[in-house]
Amino acid sequence: MSVFHDEVEIEDFEYDEETETYSYPCPCGDRFLITREDLENGEDVATCPSCSLIVRVIYDQLWHGGDRKDREDPGDPVGSSAVKMVKP
């Protein structure tokens, strides 16, 4: 059983498109990290490489596990391209 430092919404993380990694500030001064691939595989724990703290990431697993071409921006946790308005 893991003890989480906190639970953090994915929207509060910063996204690096080059590394496809989400990061969030850790109290130790480093950053909690979790990759896009981790999220797509159902992982919900972001770790800090400098200390033993971990946080649970709150996100919509269905959106992160979907087909990438369905999204405009991989860093957009809301999935703005999931619904497109079409004029009749």
Image (cartoon, helix red, strand yellow):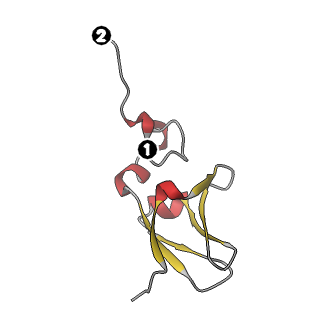
- At x 49% / y 80%, what residue is drawn? 5
Q: Residue at x 47, y 61 (%)?
A: 39
* Residue appearing at x 66%, y 80% in the figure: 28
Please rate how many residues cluster around mark 1, counting C-alpha atoms within 10 Å: few if below 14, some from 14 to 19, many from 20. Answer: few
Residue 50, by quadrant, is bottom right
The residues tagged by marks 2 and 1 sit, at their Cα atoms, a distance apart of 26 Å
Which residue is disc 1 drawn over? 67
- Would you place residue 4 above or below residue 15 in this image? below
In this view, the residue farthest toward the top is 88
Q: Amino acid at mark 1?
A: Asp
Q: Secondary structure at mark 1?
A: loop
**Left or right side of 5 for 31:** right
Residue 59 in the image, given as x and y percentages of width and height: 40, 59
| Residue 28 or residue 2, whichever sits in front | 28
In this view, which residue lies farthest toward the front?
Answer: 27
Q: Considering only order in the chain, which callout, 1 or 2, is on the residue closer to the N terminus?
A: 1
Closer mark to the observer between disc 2 and disc 1? 2
| Image disc number at residue 88 | 2
Q: Is residue 69 above or below residue 85?
A: below
Q: Is residue 73 left or right of residue 81?
A: right
Q: Residues within 10 Å of mark 2 (few under 14, many from 20)?
A: few
In this rendering, is residue 29 above or below 57? below
Which residue corresponds to the image point at 48% horizontal and 37% vertical from the top-left?
Answer: 69
Q: Amino acid at mark 2?
A: Pro
